[in-house]
Amino acid sequence: MSSEVTTASDDLNQKSIHLPVDYVRALLDTVDKGVVVTDREGRLLMINALARKHLATYTKDELLPLNIFQDLLFVDPIEVSRRIDGGENEIEL
């Protein structure tokens, strides 16, 4: 079973683009900066090779259960999510 990433297009969200996750991961690995994709609660969804290399210095365990807000930024993920839901675009941590 293959995974896909779905994203809405600019046409008022009436069309979607479906991309295999492996394509997205390969694309992220071409970026010359660390890229981390999380859900709004801070749970790690995707990470490129450079970010994985840098984050490996912060954690000895597998990165997948990593929560960026809780484990690296030491803030409450629920509070960050609440503030995002409240319309804040920038959150000083």
Image: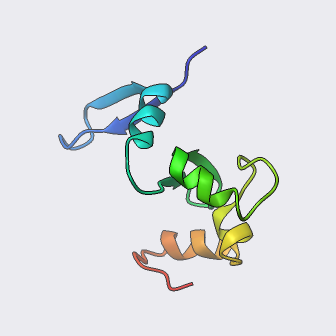
The quarter in which the N terminus is drawn is: top right
Which residue appears at 25% of the width and 35% of the height?
A: 14
Residue at the far bottom: name it.
92
- Left or right relative to 2: residue 88: left
Q: Quadrant of residue 78?
A: bottom right
Q: Is residue 69 visible?
A: yes
As drawn, 14 above or below 12: above
Which x, y percent locates residue 56?
69, 56
Q: Nearer the viewer, residue 59 or 80?
A: 59
Which residue appears at 68% of the width and 70% of the height?
A: 72
Which residue appears at 60% of the width and 50% of the height?
A: 52
- Left or right relative to 82: residue 15: left
Which x, y percent locates residue 64?
71, 46
Q: How is the rendered protein coloured?
A: rainbow
Residue at the far left: name it.
11
Q: Is residue 77 visible?
A: no
Which residue appears at 49% of the width and 81% of the height?
A: 91
Q: Nearer the viewer, residue 57 or 70?
A: 57
Residue at the far right: name it.
61
As drawn, 12 above or below 14: below
As drawn, 26 above or below 62: above
Q: Quadrant of residue 12?
A: top left
Which x, y percent locates residue 46?
55, 44
Q: Nearer the viewer, residue 66 or 87?
A: 66
As drawn, 83 above or below 1: below
Label tally? 0
The quarter in which the C terminus is drawn is: bottom right
Q: Nearer the viewer, residue 5 or 15?
A: 5
Which x, y percent locates residue 49?
54, 45
